[in-house]
Amino acid sequence: MACVHDHSCEDHDCSTDWSLYKHIDLPKVSALNEAIPGRAQKVFRSWEERLNSAFLESNDGDPELIVFIPFTSDIKIKGISIVGGADGTSPSKMRAFINREGIDFSDAQSMQAVQEWDLVENLQGVLEYQTRYSKFQSVGNLTLHFPDNFGADTSQIHYIGLKGEATQLKRDVAVNIVYEIMPNPSEHKTRAETGGGVSEV
């Protein structure tokens, strides 16, 4: 379901609503079927910069795209905004998968998405697509599948905005725990050496 903002962005700080881009692990963002490698990272930016010229485009003759979005903390997603290109290059459908890595086109076509949306051309970014909020809790990574567009040979995505909140739980935090299997005598003082009583000879 798409809805227009229920407020005027002149009177409301939309940049605060759409600030989850700060919690995206940008170097690890990737896309399948992108014409120029690395362009997927360019479509995640602040609300004020949503209409900047950088965009993600599919290869010529194949409008399908998959975008993988990992986060630096678990997030809850309330809404998604997609700004597509003009002249039929905007995606016409979006499918979402949660906490699944390595999804390719074959997987996306055969797997059940958490949610699907029919998109409309949204060149100014004034529409948002609401999620089934209860399904979008504790999201560590998000994969968006765009299977088709409005008739052009390629698909273009200029901006992907995510609305919601981040938790304080950081992901991929490595904790090193050293287990002592064989005691090293040199690392253990006897009670006699520490002045603490009798040691066994």
Image: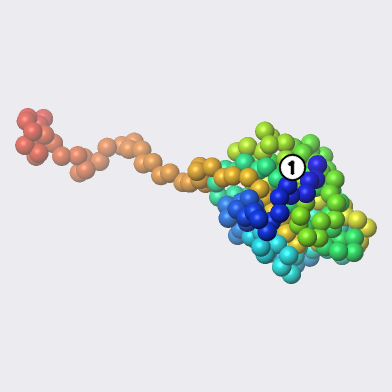
On the rendered structure, is 172 left or right of 91? Answer: left
Q: Is residue 189 above or below residue 62?
A: above
Q: In the rendered view of the protein, which quadrant contains the N terminus? A: top right
Q: Residue, x 41% and y 44% (percent of image)?
A: 176
Residue 183 appears in which quarter of the rendering? top left
Q: Residue, x 88% and y 55% (percent of image)?
A: 149
Q: Is residue 72 above or below residue 124?
A: above
Residue 104 is situated, as x and y percent measured from the top left of the image, at 76, 48
Viewer-side residue, 2 vs 96:
2
Q: Amino acid at mark 1?
A: Gln
**Callout 1 secondary element:** strand
Residue 4 is situated, as x and y percent measured from the top left of the image, at 78, 49
Residue placed furthest toward the bottom: 53
Residue 90 is situated, as x and y percent measured from the top left of the image, at 84, 58
On the rendered structure, is 2 left or right of 143? Answer: right
Residue placed furthest toward the front: 11
Residue 121 is situated, as x and y percent measured from the top left of the image, at 85, 56
Q: Residues within 10 Å of mark 1 (few under 14, many from 20)?
A: some
Q: In the rendered view of the protein, which quadrant contains the C terminus? A: top left
On the rendered structure, is 173 left or right of 163? Answer: left
Colour logic: rainbow
Task: Note whether residue 4 is visible.
Answer: yes
Give the tally of numbered discs.
1
Viewer-side residue, 65 vs 13:
13
Viewer-side residue, 117 vs 31:
117
Q: Residue, x 70% and y 62% (percent of image)?
A: 50
Residue 130 appears in which quarter of the rendering? top right
| Residue receiving disc 1 | 130
Viewer-side residue, 63 vs 163:
163
Task: Note whether residue 33 is visible.
Answer: no
